[in-house]
Amino acid sequence: MRFYVSTGIDNAALAIRLANTFISHGHELTYDWTAHGDVRYASEQRMSEVAFNEFRAVRDAELMVCLLPGGKGTHTELGAAIATRSNKRIILWSANGEEFRHDSRSCVFYYHPAVERIVCPLEVLLELFDYDVVSPEIDNYRV
């Protein structure tokens, strides 16, 4: 399975842990943005390259996991995943559900019908993804 992990730069270590869990089961990461980190202060050409690569990675993924909280890029990638979804599975994760409250932390696209909202501790999320496919037990954590 081809997958992509989206999150804010502050959560890069979490993205790496999740990606390594999938990779250990033979899945393919479509793009590793953590390898270059934050490019917001790079040249316009470099930002353009990264934007192209990240969009292509989201488009080509069969599974996209967004780890909240995320930044502007995370939300842009969520929109791109919804727009290019066809059979793509889109999982939006929160450790405590704070982002799913109906206040300034929430985003209307969190409630798009194509998005699965999951609330659980990170270690539980890693266990759910520590399979050849996403564990069906993930249904127990939907909100």
Image (spheres, rainbow, N blue to C red):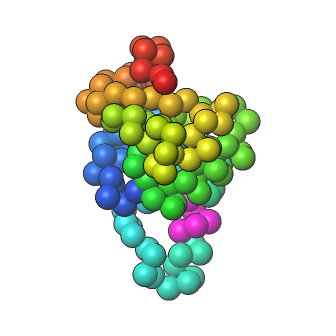
Number of marks in the rendered image = 0
Taking 127 as reference, is 38 left or right? Answer: right
Residue occupying the point 39% across, 39% down: 98
Quadrant containing the N terminus in the rendered view: top right
Q: Position of residue 138 (x, y in %)?
A: 44, 19
**For residue 35, which quarter of the picture?**
bottom left
Residue 64 position in % (x across, y down): 53, 40
Please provide percent x and percent y for residue 128.
37, 23
Based on the picture, tell me whether residue 93 belongs to the magenta stretch.
no
Is residue 91 placed above or below 50 in the rendered structure?
A: above
1 is higher (above) or lower (below) than 140: below
Q: Residue furthest bottom?
A: 43
Q: Residue furthest front?
A: 103
Q: Which residue sits at x=51%, y=40%?
A: 102
What is the magenta segment's predominant secondary structure? Answer: helix
Occupied quadrant, residue 118: top left
Image x and y of residue 45, in percent = 57, 82
Q: Nearer the viewer, residue 28 or 125?
A: 125
User: What residue is rendered at 46% in x and 37% in y?
Assistant: 101
Q: Residue at x 45, y 82 (%)?
A: 42
Query: Which residue is nearer to you in this view: 107 or 84?
Result: 107
Q: Is residue 6 visible?
A: no
Note whether 104 is above or below 133 in the view shown. below
Is residue 110 visible to the viewer in this orientation of the structure?
yes
Residue 83 placement, left or right of 25: right
Stretch of the chain drawn in magenta? 50-54
